[in-house]
Amino acid sequence: MLVQSKAVVDAAKKAGVKHIVHLGVFTPQFDCYDPHFAWHQMIEAYIKVSGIPYTFLHPNCFMQNFTGTYHLAKNGRVRFYAKDKKVGWIALEDVGEAAARILSEGPYKHQGRDYWFSTESLNIEEVAKVFSEVTGKTFAADALPPKQFLKDFREAVGDNIDPYYLGVAESFKQIVDGRMSYITDVRDDLPSLMGRKGMTLKEWAKLHKDELLRLA
């Protein structure tokens, strides 16, 4: 990840790119040592010294993780691997719209800015309740320990796990033990960018109701 990102930044500099908008992670504290979060911090440090105007996006946990790659919602159950801890959630539709606005308006308005996206803080029991209310189907919550994540992930993809997901497993551990307690924060910069708040989980679930019904 570090080498590939460095190559992209170097190529951008050679090509005369005028603005980089980097999709990072939710790191309001400098001393973060979860691997995949720290990688994003190092990439952003390199972008800063590249001399290319930049804007950094910091989304919290994606609502799409319930229906996308991770399939945290499946067979009428909603899984999460930080026990009953609350985390902040953001809809990727909102992040995408914000990124498009920033890119179109350019560095004159957004150079050197950090934007934070964490609309609502919920634990997995509260997520399951929202999905049940929206779909009319019962979703049960599985508040699982961090060590279960890699076990379940191996069942899905085998033993050849990308190191990025080892970082995800570590983040669950640090959320539970308190080192990443800031992940519960609500911090929504969409009003200043778009003139509206980010979608709540209930609003997002209504938008993706058909997908959730298939997973019920």
Image: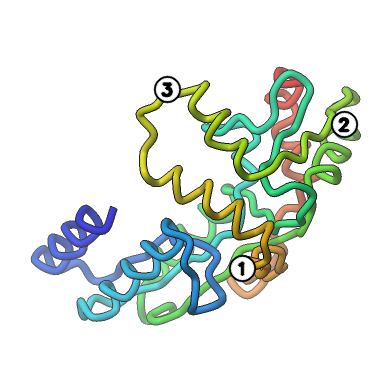
Q: Under tag 2, what secondary structure? A: helix
Cα–Cα span, label 1 and label 3: 29 Å
Residue that appears at 72% across and 43% down? 204
Tell me the tag on residue 111. Answer: none
Mark 3 and mark 2: span between their CA atoms? 31 Å
Q: In the rendered view, does 170 fall on the left or right side of 148?
A: left
Q: At 58% across and 48% down in the image, what residue appears?
A: 93
Residue at image x 11%, y 63%? 15
Q: Quadrant of residue 162?
A: top left
Q: Is residue 76 above or below residue 143?
A: above
Which residue is tagged 3? Answer: 158
Q: Which of the labelled discs sits on residue 179, or is there none?
A: 1
Give the mark count: 3
Classify mark 3: residues with Cα within 10 Å, few (<14), some (14-19) or many (20+).
few
- Crowdedness of circle 1 by 10 Å Cα count: few (<14), some, many (20+)? some
> What's the residue type where badge 1 is placed?
Arg
Residue 190 visible in the displayed image: no
Residue 105, given in percent of the width and then of the height, sits at: 42, 70
Quarter of the picture holding the C terminus: top right
Q: Position of residue 52 (x, y in %)?
A: 24, 76
